[in-house]
Image (cartoon, rainbow, N blue to C red):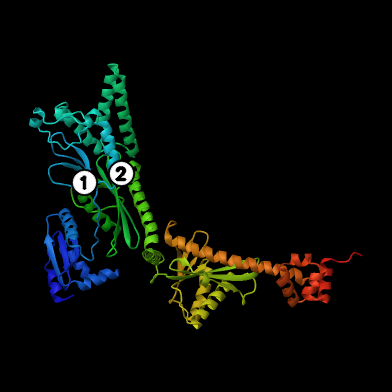
Amino acid sequence: MSASLELQVQTLPSEPGVYQYFDKEDVIIYIGKAKNLKKRVASYFNKNHENGKTRVLVKKIVNIKHIVVNTETDALLLENNLIKKYKPKYNVLLKDDKSYPWICIKKERFPRLFMTRRVIKDGSEYFGPYTSVRTVRVLLDLIKELYPLRTCTSDLSQNNISEGKYKVCLEYHLKNCKGACEGLETEANYNDSIKEIRNIIKGNFKESLEKFQEMMFHFAEKMEFEEAQKIKEKLYLLGNYQSKSTIVNPSINNVDVFSIISDETHGYANFLKISNGSIIQSHTTEIKKKLDETDKELLELFIVEIRQRFNSQSPEIYVPFKVNIGEGIKVTIPVLGDKKRIVELSERNAKYFRMEQFKQIKIVDPDRHVKRIMAQMKKDLRLSVEPRHIECFDNSNIQGTNPVAACVVFKDGKPSKKEYRHYNIKTVEGPDDFASMEEVVYRRYKRLLAEDEPLPQLIIVDGGKGQLSSALKSLDILGLRGKIAIIGIAKRLEEIYYPDDPIPLYLDKKSETLKITQYLRNEAHRFGITFHRNKRSKSAIQSELEQIPDVGAQTITTLLRKFKSAKRVKEASFADLIETIGNARAIKVHEYYHPKKE
C-alpha cells in the first residue's frame, strides 16, 4: 500500500458511511457501506484475500473517498443509490431493464382505474409494480366484474355535469358504468367503490365480501332474486380469487418475504409480498457475483433494492437467516409453522427460477453452463483447478473369472466415448480388486506419459480407501502424486475419500457435483461389465469347443469365424464342416456332437 493510501485509511472516521474506491484513471471501481468506515476500509489492506478478483481490486485502488451518514440504514440506501448511478466494475448491480406494469387509480373526480407502465408524479395512486401482466389483467377483469367504473377520459367536474356537457355512452347501457357523466351516480358512492377496490388490490377482501353479502340478503328479502343472483356471482368471483391467492394463515399481513440460493458464480433471490395471507407480488432475479459475495451480502443488497423499487412500506420481513438492513424494520427468521412455510415457498421459487435459467443457458450459452458446473465441482470436491478432464476406473470380475478393468473419460462434464479404454488384467491372479486397480492405473498413465498425451485434472476410482491407496501406489511410482487430484467414491453411502484423510466427504444428495460423479462411476461400471460379459461369453463358447478331442485353437477360431457360435457348429451339416475345416477335422467335430449309437 502506498504512503498516500495509508494516510487516507488512517484518517478515515470511525463512523457509519459509504466509501468509494478510485483507480488511476479516477474512475469509481467499487462502492461499499460500513458501520465503521475506518475498520472496514482498513480490512481490505490488512489481510490476504482468497478471492482473486478482490486481490486485483485492492491493487487497482489509488484513491479513497467517503461519505459519513447518521445511521447504518442511511448507509445502505446511499450505497444502493450510488451503485445504480455509477455502476462500478466490481459491484454487484441488480439489473432491471424491464418496464413493469402498475395499476393506477387516477387523481381526478370519479377516478379511472387502468394498467400503465409509466409512473407519473401527479398525485395518482400506483400499485405494483407487478412482474406479470397477466396478474394485472386478471385483477382488473375481476374489479370490472365487481364494480362498474367509468372508462372515458372526460373531465367530470361538478360544473360540466350540472351543465349537461356529456351524455351517457354504450358502457352505461351495457351496465359497465353507472353514468356519473350525467349525474346518475354520486361522487360519494363512486368513492366508496374506489376504497373497496384499493383494499382488494392490497389483498384485503374482508370489507368487500361483507358488503356484497349484505346486498345479496337485502335483495333476497325484497324478493329481487335476479339482483340477488348477480351479487351472488360477484361473491363467487371474489371468493374464488381469494382462495387462489391465499396460501397461509390470513392473520399474516403486510409482510415481505426474501430468500436466496446460490452457486459459485450467481445468486438467485426471490421476493414475495404477503397481505392478509395472500401473495400479492412475486419477483425473482439472478445476481452475478463480482467478488465472491456471500449469500448474506447478496440478500441484503436485494432486500434494500427491491423494497425501494417496489415502494414497499411493510414493517416486517421474513428471511431464512439473519440480515442487517438497518433500523425500523422487524426481521423474523421463522423456525416452524405457516411463517416457515412461506420462507420455504420463497426458496422453492428461487430454486425453480435457477433451474429454468440453467435450462435456457444450456441451450443458448453452453460455454457458460460448462464454466458454472466446472467451478461448482472445483469448490465441492476441494480441487485446486477445474476438473475439465476426468478419468474414472472400475474393476469387473465375477467369482474371480476373466478380471478386466474399465477407464472412462469425461471432458467438460460430458462423456468422451472415443477415449474410453478396456483393460485385461495381466499381472494379478484371482479376484484381487486392489492389485487390479494398481495395475490398470499404472498402465494407463505410463502410456499417457510415454505418448506425451494430456493428463486429467481428476482421477476417480470406484471404491473406498483400499482402491484409492492402490491407485496412489502407481501414481507414486510414476511421479504423478500431487500433480493429479485423485478421489475414491464408495458405493454404500456415496462417501468421497481423499488421500491421507480417513474422514470421507459427503456431498449434498441433490448437488450437480454428486450427480456427475455418480454418472462417471456408473458409466465406468457399465462399460466394464459389458466388456466382462462379452469376454465371459466368448470364453464359454471356446471352452465348449475345446472339449472336442484333437481340435486345436486355430480350428476353433476358424469354426467361430464361420458359424459364430458353438450352437451353430453343433447344428452345421457334415458337408459344411468339411468345407470349413477339411475332412479329417470335420469327422472329429461331427462325431463329438453326433456320436454313433452302439
The label on residue 134 is: 2
**Where is residue 202 shown, x and y percent of the image?**
24, 39
- Element at label 2: helix
Query: How many numbered callouts?
Result: 2
Q: Amino acid at mark 1?
A: Ser
Closest to the observer: 440 or 505? 440
| Residue located 35% across and 42% down the image | 337
| Residue located 19% across and 57% down the image | 80
| Residue located 32% across and 55% down the image | 268
Closer to the N terminus: mark 1 or mark 2?
2
Residue lying at the far bottom in this picture: please name it. Answer: 450
**Where is residue 204 shown, x and y percent of the image?**
25, 35
| Depicted 283 relative to depicted 253: above or below | below
The label on residue 312 is: 1
Compared across the picture, whether 59 is left or right of 541 comes to left
- Element at label 1: loop
Q: Is residue 9 visible?
A: no
Q: Amino acid at mark 2?
A: Arg
Q: Are marks 1 and 2 in contact (CB under 8 Å)?
A: no
Judge depth for marks 1 and 2 and give the one in front: 2
Closest to the observer: 523 or 258? 523
